[in-house]
Image (cartoon, grey):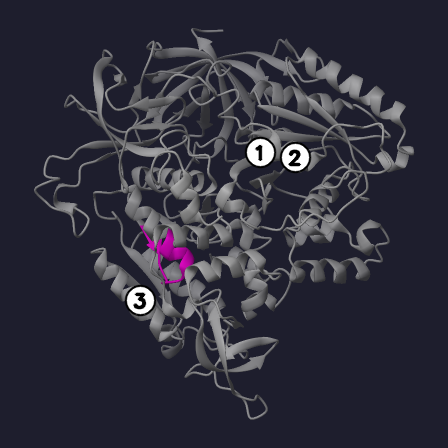
Amino acid sequence: MSTTTLEYRAADAAATGTLFRFATAGSVDDGKSTLVGRLLHDSKAILADQLEAVARTSTERGFGGGAGGLDLALLTDGLRAEREQGITIDVAYRYFATDRRSFILADCPGHVQYTRNTVTGASTADAVVVLVDARKGVLEQTRRHLSVLSLLRTAHVVVAVNKIDLVGYARQVFEEIEADVLGAAAGLGIDGARVVPVSALVGDNIVLRSDLTPWYTGPTLLELLETLPTQEETTDADLPFRFPVQTVLRPQGALAPGLDADAFRDYRAYAGQVASGSISVGDDVTVLTAGQEPRTTTIAGIDTADGPLPAAAAPASVALRLADEFDISRGDTILAGPVPAAHREFTARLCWLSDTPLRAGTRVLVKHGTATTRGIVTAVTGRLDLDSFATGPADTLGLNDIGTVGLKVSAPLPVEAYAANRRAGALLVIGPQDGNTLAAGLVVGGGTP
Amino acid sequence: MTVTQELANAPAGPHPTTAPRQVLDALEAESIHILREVVAEFDRPAMLFSGGKDSVVMLHLAAKAFWPGRVPFPLLHVDTGHNFPEVLEFRDQTVERLGLRLEVASVQDYIDSGELSERADGTRNPLQTTPLLDAIAGHRFDAVFGGGRRDEDKARAKERILSLRDEFGQWDPRNQRPELWNLYNGRHPVGHHVRAFPISNWTELDIWRYIEREAIALPGIYYAHEREVFTRDGMWRAVGEFSEPTAAEEVVRRTVRYRTVGDMSCTGAVLSDAGTVTDVVAEVAASTLTERGATRADDRISEAAMEDRKKDGYF
């Protein structure tokens, strides 16, 4: 099959398509910036004035590569220091659309703080594309990326075996790497990883199918991204209803102009975003407030500014009215199904993101859903070896370490195992003094480690 | 298929009863979540509002987020003194319709008092930073919503949804907090503040499709109209009080519209017959130039023009 020009640019994508978020992760010099540039270029997401700027700089630097002498990596350079040093410093977000979908791409740098960046990008992604250099195969860093994605329970892992042109489009090279990747992924509990042979520089199998890999019959990278189901449709499907209350809507004296004051005199609704699952009017729900017994009631209404809804599902932002008048405030959770226990002490995996090492006894703030509470790290019990995926003994965590800790919080939190419910098992660890985000937390379970 | 047709074909009314996976529903849900988080966690939020399309959409989302309550924060406009009169009129009507309070920080006042001086190129956008920072400090705002979008510019592509600023309003791109899941951390030292960007993930086309779907009113200059214009730096510039052609610049009448609405001294028009929102959606979808590349002289100053302005406290 020969390459054809696809008119992907915009069209009605944003009107008819769904939103799909993905991230890229790679090692040093594996051509990730070029891959992202190629994806944007070949899906016609790059406009003429951006291309002109790239062409100017490519010529100035004497670039002689593919894509008509355009250094596509330049498309993703954002900051002055990045252009000057030829590196990527921070996660950058890109946007493009095809006939099928609109994409939000979190482009995560590979060399500086790759754990922090991969965790950040993957935390909101439906899929993560990991790059492997066909000449080098699966590296230590590839295993580390896969380990992080396993921990974060990313819905889809796609491995792009790049620079396939530099190994002469050799089927055997690809198949050996594919076997290594699938073996490593299976060992980490990642199901259904996809492996695609690509050349970002030349454009093989990124958007357009390559003539030079006739032995590869699977989808191109873009075809995969267009057809993989979203996180909500896969790992988060069938989860129970969870709704952290953001704020109470009780307009009273401050009603929006034009509304009937009498009709809204006693209006009270709980605003939030459905974190998981779905709910319908008339359903039984439980309200969890820290330090109180669970209270049960039913959903009297699901409101939006456009009118009431019969039902709502993640990730809708709505306002819930309840049949009973409870005292409910920000930080409380409205949920359905079996009631999870609220824990004052629990075990979590932390991806440590701070230069200051973590030790037992460190005082922190913990943000879970819409609740923020004081906490203390009671113990650091282990550090994950990303190469072997085994947890070894440790009593401190340094920058970019992933380890197991015990946390004790001042108000009990309805934390659930991250492995069972990503939203209900995710938390931030925050420095109480400077307010910095110190760690991404993944709850393991109640009790101390 | 148009949005209207799509909605007509949707299974249950204009808003799905299941997951909001359609692009605009998903973006709206995310933006409303961010607006509510910031209002719940900060003491004195405010929203930058210029009457431009992005700030109009952001304010529309705020009205939806807090319905049936009024938008629970004041608006702030940094007026360059070179604004399009139609846009200022629209701004004031919108503020009144929603029953809100508007604070105006005036670049002209700073020029008149000598605290700022006019640039040689006449562009006033970079001059907005000082009045903005003074207004934030003077009103003790601790969070300021801005309508910046990551698809606008290379520096903005690296911006967080909640972006910390020190007492000088400076953005430090190398020292940004990681943003994980939908858990936003707005903690900041006293005297610092946070810029919040609820429509970070919207593209120009998303904005226009949403304006169409929600029937959101905009200043008339976003739609095709006849105007006296001249070309400068490869852009069509309006003839007006603040943008006078030189003797060498020929004035002609053309049918134009504005893709971005900023300071008259640096915002260019595009030739367009798009007289309705549906026409504009079609035009933006087919455009081969970015909106800033097509219409903003201030971003042509250098490849890092936006980055430099942001580091100094600009949005």
Residue matched to label 2:
A24
Residue B99: x %, y % from top left: 20, 56
Quadrant in the rendering for residue B65 = top left
Amino acid type at circle 3 is: Phe
What amino acid type is highlighted by mark number 1? Gly
Residue A103 vs residue A416, the one in the foreground: A103
Q: Is residue B233 placed above or below A77 in the rendered structure?
A: below
Mark 1 — residue?
A121
Please provide percent x and percent y for residue A142: 73, 25
- Viewed as shown, does residue B169 lie left or right of A31? left
Task: Say whether residue A203 is visible.
Answer: yes
Q: Residue at x 29, y 21 (%)?
A: A334
User: Mark on residue B90?
Assistant: 3
Check if mark 2 and mark 3 are on a common chain.
no
Residue B177 visible in the current orientation? no
Residue placed furthest toward the bottom: B247
* Distance from the alpha carbon under mark 2 to that under mark 1: 8 Å
Q: Is residue A323 above or below residue B160?
A: above
Q: Are marks 2 and 1 in contact (CB under 8 Å)?
A: yes
Segment tinted magenta in the rendering: B46-57
Q: Secondary structure at mark 3?
A: helix
